[in-house]
Amino acid sequence: MYDVAVIPGDGIGNEVVEAVEPLLVDVADAHGVSIETTWFDWGSQRYLDEGALMPDDGLDRLEDFDAILLGAVGHPDVPDHVTLRGLRLPITKGFQQHVCKRPAYLFEGVRSPLRGYEGGDIDFVVYRQNTEGEYADVGGREHRGFDNEVAVQASVFTREGTEKLLRPAFEAASERSGHLTNVTKSNAQAHGMVFWDDMVAEVSEDYPDVEVERLLVDAASMDMVRRPDEFDVLVASNLFGDILTDIGGGVMGSLGLAPSTNIDPDGTYPSMFEPVHGSAFDIMGEGIANPLGTVLSASLMFEHLGEDAVAEALWAGVAEQLADADAPRTADIGGSARTVAVTDDLRDRLV
Ligand code: GGG
């Protein structure tokens, strides 16, 4: 039996998680796997009501779970840096989730905005450093309102944090095509990112079967829309990985389909799984959000827990549904179905 903490968070995070959670429980059960979920109503509404997105002992309350399922964070009445630093970042950093693995896959039946790509043509995975880099909370702001007002935001790259991201990425590249793209901006960022390049070179010595391509992030962004089929495994810093994976969501047809994992590679703490998309307040409450990014994230959660049959069933169910022109689909991928119609259809296919 697995204990899963469920944090729907903000906006459409609530709608997709509420639709997907019962499906997961049923699909797992159909494969003889039992999961028990505990819900936490943490997020921006809690911040507006009580002054904090999560309680002071939030990490203690999550620590003994086997995994965490997160919806989304972000609220129009709360500054974005408050929401991100109040919930998602304390969890990723507090639980040493160095590895943010985000696959981008063009499913059969989904139209990429890029012409000429069919299902299966785009299939890459971005490994984003998830605990430091540009998201290190180092800096300050002084002399507010004066002419000499100043803001400093430092990036932090450590040997441990970088290596803990790179090794799983090299492992994945070794198991996949043997090709890894290292994305930096080390011509302009001569300290942290040159250190990152040096770490890539050092770790690559243990993976002689992996060919490393080096791209600057501007060129990588262009190539992701020009030749996305040529990428396989990419490694990038926290900020660059965040940006590149939104491009990934775009080229796979919708950010609403894109899954994400936040992994503690040492397995000391629970890992966290969430769709890449945010809280999308513009469509909140309409019941039309795409739940498939959350279903695919849950598939990756079961894979992480070692429950491959459940993981494969969920992934295959999504692939089958998307390939079926008569199946319900949400507006972001060309349909008009409601969130629950999509999860109900998946249940019919899988349970
Ligand atoms: N479900 C992911 C989510 O809510 N993302 C909101 C966001 O702003 N994330 C920033 C980041 O991933 O760095």
Image (spheres, rainbow, N blue to C red):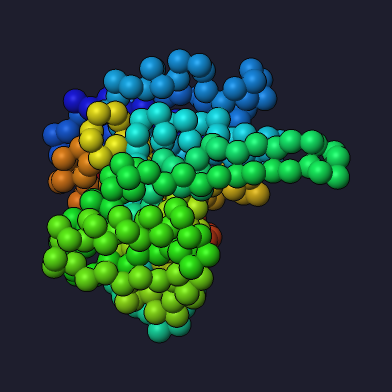
Residue 4 in the image: x percent, y percent? 31, 28
Residue 155 in the image: x percent, y percent? 51, 47
Count of labels shown? 0
Of 16 and 125, nearer the camera is 125
Asked whether residue 142 is in view, the answer is yes
Q: Residue at x 59, y 35 (%)?
A: 83
345 over 254 or under it: above or below: above
34 over 245 or under it: above or below: above
Which residue sits furthest bottom?
116
Q: Quadrant of the C terminus?
A: top left
209 over 130 or under it: above or below: below
254 over 223 or under it: above or below: above
Q: Quadrant of the N terminus?
A: top left
Of 51 and 266, nearer the camera is 266
Q: Residue at x 79, y 42 (%)?
A: 149
Q: Residue at x 30, y 24 (%)?
A: 65
Residue 7 in the image: x percent, y percent? 45, 30
Of 198 and 63, nearer the camera is 198
Q: Is residue 248 left or right of residue 179?
A: right
Residue 314 in the image: x percent, y percent? 26, 49
